[in-house]
Amino acid sequence: MARVVVDAMGGDAGLSAVIEGVARLTLEENDIQILLVGDVDEITDALGNQAHDPSKLQVAHSGPAVGMGDSPRAALEACPDASILVAMAALAQGDADALVSAGSTGATILAASQHLERLPGIRRAALAAVYPTEQRHGPKDDPFALILDVGATLTATAEDLVSFAIMGSAYANIISDNPNPHVALLSNGTEASKGTEAIKAAHQILLKHPSIQFTGNVEGLDIPRGTVDVVVCEGFLGNVVLKMLEGVGEVVTDLAKDAYARKFLWRLGLTMLSQGLRQLRVMTDWKQYGGAPLLGFDKVVIKAHGRSNPRAIRNAIKVAAKAVDRDLAGQIKRGLQDIL
């Protein structure tokens, strides 16, 4: 049985989306126990409007969420009972095995750093994210690959990049059921001599790692193609890449809508391509994947998208429970032992 604490106050869609997603999940056949953290009165009112199984739910009171536009550090210092702090404290104290939040990414990372222990050998945590690719991955033909770090760090040493590779490989193994994920470093060329000093040094270390299927370097054009399952880079670069991928997807959608509205022949062409466009929408729908893991701590933390709807919240909790059931932290520890 996995116990997941949920920051009910975080997210752009508000409390209602979180509660609806949680309520639906409690009615499914699973062993997931959920601790909702937030304003008790508001949560109780919201649950009253949703069919749910109360035996799978507990509620803990907290203050408000950290705003998306707030300075995370200043907001947490000013509000010690903020929902993410109360939820993270519950996780650290053993009241839950995993945490899910759609709130401020910066506040989630900072709260985790304050309350959780890093795994032995991990100097810096990493935020991973999935992105759609042309190629499929693993035995389940997963249309997503993983990239990390995408925002927990600005720069990374060679040792950091190696630990990112180990954590990303473990996560892809567990969540995508991929027993042998291919891992690569993002660089400005595929040659081992290309990249920063940190990338070149990490390349040599990963070549010798016994449990990582390291394929070398990849370039930016390889990311949407999906030539590997896990792409490793420093957080500044990863965040830029992730935002670019999201922007391209939105531009393609907007162009299709504009074309449909302009001319009959364009509408006819788009209608003929409707099946392919439908498949593209399914493939690029991040809601089905749930959220992004914050890797490197002794507990499972899943950062759901800020715009998460009930479906995305439900799937984020499922991902968190799966990571707990399959001992994500333990698998990362075992991978780190080979380089310590």
Image (cartoon, rainbow, N blue to C red):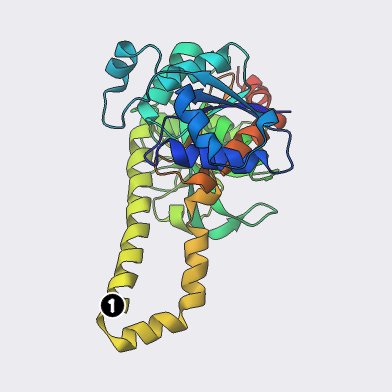
**Can you say whether 254 is above or below 300 in the image?**
below
User: Can residue 246 be seen here?
Assistant: yes
- State left or right for residue 278 relative to residue 178: left
Q: Residues within 10 Å of mark 1 (few under 14, many from 20)?
A: few
User: Badge 1 is on which residue?
Assistant: 261
- State left or right for residue 81 relative to residue 227: left
- State left or right for residue 65 relative to residue 290: left
Query: Residue flagged by tag 1: what amino acid is it?
Result: Ala
Which residue occupies 44% across, 12% down?
114
Which residue occupies 54% across, 35% down?
47
**Can you say whether 220 is above or below 278 in the image?**
above
Tally of numbered tags: 1
Residue, far bottom: 265
Quadrant where the image shows the C terminus? top right
Q: In terms of depth relative to the viewer, which is nearer, 280 or 317?
A: 317
Picture coordinates of residue 293, whole percent (x, y)? 52, 33
Picture coordinates of residue 115, whole percent (x, y)? 49, 12
Where, by quadrant of the figure, is residue 142 drawn? bottom right
Picture coordinates of residue 186, whole percent (x, y)? 43, 42
Q: SS class of the residue under badge 1?
A: helix
Q: In terms of depth relative to the viewer, which is nearer, 286 or 77?
A: 77
- State left or right for residue 123 relative to residue 75: right
Q: In terms of depth relative to the viewer, which is nearer, 210 or 292?
A: 292
Where, by quadrant of the figure, is residue 182 drawn? top right
Picture coordinates of residue 87, whole percent (x, y)? 50, 20
Which residue occupies 31% across, 88% down?
264
Q: In terms of depth relative to the viewer, which is nearer, 12 or 46?
A: 46
Which residue occupies 30% across, 18% down?
75
Quadrant where the image shows the N terminus? top right
**Can you say whether 339 is above or below 56 in the image?**
above
Where, by quadrant of the figure, is residue 150 drawn? top left
User: Can residue 162 be seen here?
Assistant: no
